[in-house]
Amino acid sequence: MNKGTAYGVGVGPGDPELMTLKACRLIKENEIIALPGKAPQETVAYKIAAAAVPELAEKELVPIEMPMVRDRDLLKESHRRAADTIERYLDEGKNVVYLTLGDPTIYCTFNYIQHLLEADGYPVELVSGITSFCAAAAVLKTSLTEWDQALHVIPALHNTEGQLDFPGSYVLMKAASHMADVKEMLRRSGHVVQGVENCTMENERIYRSLEEIPDDAGYFSLLIAKKPE
């Protein structure tokens, strides 16, 4: 029996209308849908996709638990369990569509599972989705890059003591849990900062300056920083 294929599918930042046609087609054509969380129907990725593809409610939903911890050993264990769960379906010749927010190539937990699946000999494909930072820039009506500007995408959680010394624009992701420290770093840098919380979702909030951004901003918060012109 041929092995099934695992698809890492981005559902975009939040607005169901920003899902790609390919993402919708793969959900419709396959019966096994994996989602990152203990309760698939409660995940943000499910709610986004279900609004665009009502047929999702009729699929077999597979919970993939991903603990929000920084312990590398615990993370490796969870990734192995996730890969084992998906491989059971692949061994039956069934495809597995793993839904993830944004794009599966940007700080996505599926990447860790992908490496394990490929090492075990299973076919994997990635399906791009609109990234949170591209959607945020559109909401803010600002460009990320112009002419010869560079774009730097950094996980702010791991860089609160860093320096934003390179020329160009910065996207700061994963900032919420250390927002006060991230804001202080940005004050020192002299950048002009805007932010979006829950981009393109019903509870979206837009921040036009560093001062407007609350220290307790929600998990889905993203900042865009530029040097003043």
Image (cartoon, rainbow, N blue to C red):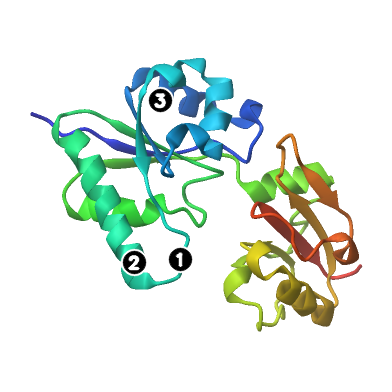
- The image position of residue 200, as x and y in percent, is 72, 38
Alpha carbon distance from label 1 to label 3: 31 Å
Task: Name the secondary structure under disc 2.
Answer: helix
- Asked if residue 111 lies left or right of residue 16, the reply is left
The picture quadrant where one finds residue 151 is bottom right
| Residue 122, placed above or below residue 68 | above
- Asked if residue 104 lies left or right of residue 154, the reply is left
Crowd around label 3: few <14 · some 14–19 · many ≥20 (10 Å): some
Crowd around label 1: few <14 · some 14–19 · many ≥20 (10 Å): few
Quarter of the picture holding the C terminus: bottom right
Cβ atoms under marks 2 and 3 closer than 8 Å: no
Cβ atoms under marks 2 and 1 closer than 8 Å: yes
Tell me the residue at 32%/57% (across/down). Answer: 78
- The image position of residue 17, as x and y in percent, is 65, 26
Which residue matches tag 2? 74
The picture quadrant where one finds residue 223 is bottom right
Which residue matches tag 1? 69
- Asked if residue 223 lies left or right of residue 161, the reply is right
| Residue 221, placed above or below residue 161 | above
Which residue matches tag 3? 26
Between residue 198 and residue 223, name the one nearer to us: 198
Crowd around label 2: few <14 · some 14–19 · many ≥20 (10 Å): some
